[in-house]
Amino acid sequence: AQKVTQAQTEISVVEKEDVTLDCVYETRDTTYYLFWYKQPPSGELVFLIRRNSFDEQNEISGRYSWNFQKSTSSFNFTITASQVVDSAVYFCALSEFPQGGSEKLVFGKGTKLTVNP
Amino acid sequence: DSGVTQTPKHLITATGQRVTLRCSPRSGDLSVYWYQQSLDQGLQFLIQYYNGEERAKGNILERFSAQQFPDLHSELNLSSLELGDSALYFCASSVGGGSVNTDTQYFGPGTRLTVL
């Protein structure tokens, strides 16, 4: 079963629009971490945020904000007043702790965001 | 710049060949992770090393192997290459080895492997 679902494959917006990227996850663990990474056209993966399962407070960092809701197993990412430089593929990831093993990141398929001028 | 370095940036080779990808973690990080990103499979975890020892395995083929050296750099060896091995290979590093108090994985720029 897919553990991290990013239902939006591609989103296209016009500059200055707000955009929300959805992420729904599935886990049986009570302790887990959620992440968002950005992959710009240059290809590298850039860390954006980490959130643990015990902290449901929303977080804001500049134009970025994240909404974590355990009740719906969602960790959505909103970009306010989008800019062309925000164009990238955004990945949501889940970190689990399998018994006897180490944590590993399970990634969603990614959402490709295009911000047009 | 994450502080994780990977070489080479690009690699073009033929089927049946063997290649080695290299990764240097951020200063102070003990764990190295390898991921494969392909169009059909997305981003997949391959293997993790912590302080020289294998810690976790993911969807890594038997034709692939990795190791972490005493200076903590890591190499991913891919042998008997097939067309389907063409992908972007990422290395990531983190401070710890994986525990409840997990830390963030920082990714390198990737090595793009093309098998012809």
Image (tube, coloured by chain):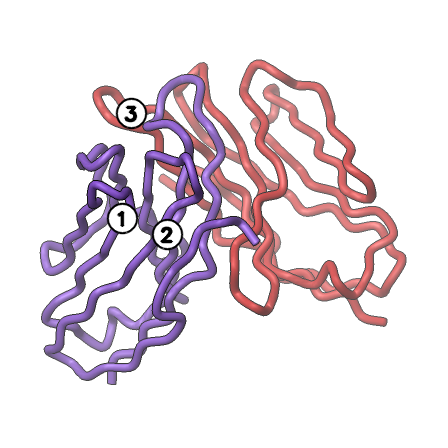
Tell me if mark 2 has few (under 14), some (14-19) or many (20+) residues whose alpha carbon lies within 10 angstroms of its own.
Answer: many
Residue nearer the viewer, A38 or A10: A38
Locate residue B29, reporting x and y percent.
39, 36
Q: What colour has chain B?
A: purple
**Label 1: element kind:** strand
**Label 3: element kind:** loop
Locate residue A60, reporting x and y percent.
78, 32
Residue type at tag 3: Pro
Marks 2 and 1 on same chain: yes
Q: Which chain carries label 1?
A: B
Locate residue A55, reporting x and y percent.
62, 16
Q: Which chain carries label 3?
A: A
Q: Is residue B108 above or below residue A25?
A: below
Q: From the viewer's perspective, is B14 left or right of B87?
A: left
Marks 3 and 1 on same chain: no
User: Which residue is tagged 3?
Assistant: A98
